[in-house]
Image (tube, rainbow, N blue to C red):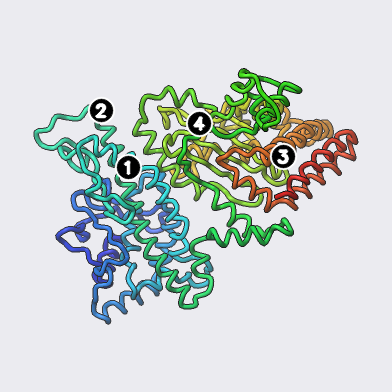
Amino acid sequence: MQLQQVLQVLTTAIGHDLDPANSPEIDTMDVDVQPAGSKEPPPLNRQASSCPGGPHPTKPVPSKSPEDPSLHKAVPTTTLAACVALIRDSCFLPFLIRELNGTTFTDSRTSYYTTLMLLVRALCNPAAAHLLLTDLPGQVGSSVRRIFLPELHTMANHFIRASRPFYDAEMNSSGSNPSGASSSAGGSATHAGGSSSAAADGTPASGAKPQSKTASAQATNIQELGAGLALADLIVSCSSYISDLVEKDARAGAGEAAAEAGGTSCSAMDATVGALDGSGSAEPEDYCACMKQFQVKGMKGRMGLGGAGKREAAVEAGGMSGPAMDATVGALDGSGSAEPEDYCACMKQFQYAFKSDVSSENCQPMSRQVRLAKELAGLQKFLPITESSSILVRIDEQQMMVWKVLITGPEDTPYDGGCFVFDMYFPSTYPSVPPKLLLKTTGGKTVRFNPNLYDCGKVFLVPQSRFYIRAFGGEHILLSNIFQGFKLVSNICQGILGAPVKVLLSIQSLILVPAPYFNEPGFEQTIDTKEGKSASRQYNKAIHIGTIRYAMMDLLKHPPAEFADAIKNHFRLRRDYILKTTQMWVDEAHEFDKAHSEQLKAYRERLKQQLEEL
């Protein structure tokens, strides 16, 4: 009951226009209150959560733009000042900020998060606006606006772009009119979804025939998608108001408020990168701010024809090597001609790895669409962007089951600084089955970068810790088994992190490790022995060469189109660090294998020339 009571007080005192004729009856809504000290926020009860688009099952919540005069309706000064002072001096703001930090589209508490957004919208009033911009005492960076801009705003926009066209199409095909509810991010905060003959809770109306199991599941998915869009619309509406506040504050001389709230803008990013051209070095903040711009993007064109470097494409497609491969690559560079067989073999590898799976699909199941829209919304929040290692994703906007992934090699590993590209596909029965993944950076099927990264691109996972070994019986597991395994052992983030995030984080942390030799089952028994260390060092020799040659040089020269800008900026900003790291590899190899050291040195010099041209 607490959240609804707070919302009622705020909307009354601040003057937010929630007309009883067309708004939720807040005083009649109930909440299951949890005992004091409970870590989980109280969920809305059945009445509140049954509505797909907001906290009330029958009456829509009109979303209003910041310019709407009703948002600034005059109220008694004494009441307004008292309410603002009460909010400022109470634990309400810390509570609100804590809960907003946990907002996600991937769990089942959409109604709860919608109520939180209504609370924020109630504060979107000139008299209370400073509460949205001010950091909590003694906690720099802890304000509502820092959560909305850019994190929640980006998350909501990702969800809207992924969901709205599909949702509208479904509503149109069922005879409903989704545009009547909302057709833009700033429109209505309610998407009722489903047929008019069905009640809001999904049960058939009086006189209607009971829905089949499939139809009922479809209606539930549509309602779930509509509820997510309602939440996303509220976030965008509040973000717009807060963004306007930040801009006004900046114009008034508030210093760096606008830049900090909205992240690094394009012009600021260009200035940062331009300033680095001479030195090739960057502070961690510069690198992260720049790369954040490239982390998650939807590609408007289909990603079925894009990607591999010419040399790698020729090798992977036709198994060519030596002169045949060089002739084919040369022909594509304009230096010669290629036989039709060579050309077709080479161009084949520019295709998406799971193109045949995509082509065989007859439709896009709603259950998969709903799940992917939710997981896409949370990617930028849960995937890391750091100097040490980053994960970037590209999604085909026309075929959301088609993803491409780039993982930069973690520091202090033989993959350090390299870029490793994967193709990812979500089958039509996802989330009942796991996603498929294939490594594309294989040096033309010549390099096995890890016991779990085969030269053909297949990906496997070996448990690293005793906990995982005990949980999985110490067996060598296929990637497909990770999906089920995480359901058993990933209790901390259960229901929050989607399967794609879990899988990608597992590859980053469990496969791209400092001593990949010990990923081989049974080899971990020698991890602290002289023989084990020697074998590990020997195993890393090929990885060092492969990382420089294929995960750095080849990708610099022939980057996948989807990641071209990200790869260029990664190597530009990390140039000095990468040269220092590769020199360390050369020096370490010189102590044990001088011939290998000379080979590494030669590749490093070629890499240095490429980096200096950036």
Tag 1 secondary structure: helix
Number of numbered markers: 4
- Residue 61, image x, y percentages: 24, 56
Front residue of 39/350: it is 350
Residue pictured at 45% horizontal, 57% vertical: 101
Residue of label 1 = 225
Instruction: Report the amino acid beneath label 4.
Output: Gly
Q: Nearer the viewer, mark 3 or mark 2?
A: 3
Residue of label 3 = 553
Q: Quadrant of the N terminus?
A: bottom left
Instruction: Report the amino acid beneath label 1.
Output: Leu
Residue 521 appears in view:
no
Residue pictured at 65% horizontal, 58% vertical: 284
Q: Which mark is residue 491?
A: none
Instruction: Report the amino acid beneath label 2.
Output: Lys
Instruction: Report the amino acid beneath label 3.
Output: Met
Tag 3 secondary structure: helix
- Label pair 4/3, CB-CB below 8 angstroms: no
